Amino acid sequence: MADITATKFQSKGSEGSSKVKERVFEFDLDADGIGAAATHNLVAIPEGEAFLDAQVIWTELPVTGTSVQFLATSSGTDMTFTGALATANCTIGSVIELRSNLANTETGANMGDLYHDGTVITSLTLDITCIGTTFTAGKFMIVMRTLDLNDYSGDIGQVA
């Protein structure tokens, strides 16, 4: 899969640390060609960063398809964040939380796979699985936070 077709992208440090990266991606199920009934790559986790969490925010109602599911894929192994979400529940402004501690690893995935070091695993992506007929409309944003582990030398402080 080589979808990864975010139409807009914004990045900044967050929470007072330049090591925590927040990125915002916008997607259009129809225009970006990711509305067909299949699994599509959305966002590649940068090398040397650990996935912390993400929020999916619907900005336009999805039309035609039956449901969607969000997951992370690492070296071909899926870790699901959500079950199948019915299209009717994907209302404008609704927020879907994707947190690494809630990923379902029953398929044999290791939670450590959510850390992409560029050596141990070949890739880590956030994906969407579209179920049912092809979506003809629907837009959403992903706000993703990662922790930059490259050359980490920051003082983490002490508890008094």
Image (tube, rainbow, N blue to C red):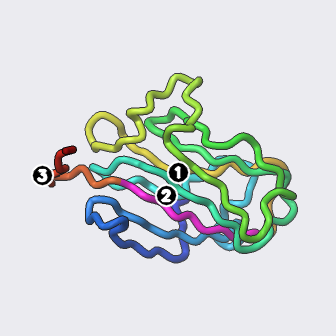
Q: Position of residue 87 (x, y in %)?
A: 83, 56
Q: Is residue 146 visible?
A: yes
Q: Position of residue 27 (x, y in %)?
A: 61, 69
Question: How far apart are the two marked residues, 3 and 2, measured between alpha carbons?
Answer: 27 Å
Furthest-front residue in view? Answer: 160
Question: How far apart are the two marked residues, 1 and 3, measured between alpha carbons?
Answer: 28 Å
Amino acid at pointer 1? Leu
On residue 43, which mark appears?
Answer: 2
**Residue placed under numbered mark 3 in the picture:** 153
Q: How many residues crowd around disc 3 within 10 Å: few (fewer than 14), some, or many (20 or more)?
A: few
Q: Position of residue 145 (x, y in %)?
A: 43, 58
- Closer mark to the observer between disc 1 and disc 3: 3
Amino acid at pointer 2? Val
Tell me whether the residue at label 1 lies in contact with that at label 2, contact meaning CB atoms closer than 8 angstroms.
Answer: yes
Q: Nearer the viewer, residue 15 or 160?
A: 160
User: What residue is rendered at 26% in x and 38% in y?
Assistant: 119
**Residue placed under numbered mark 1 in the picture:** 126
Q: Secondary structure at mark 1?
A: strand
In the image, is residue 43 above or below residue 61?
Answer: above
Q: Position of residue 38 (x, y in %)?
A: 70, 48
Q: How many residues crowd around disc 2 within 10 Å: few (fewer than 14), some, or many (20 or more)?
A: some
The total of numbered circles placed on residues is 3
Q: Secondary structure at mark 2?
A: strand
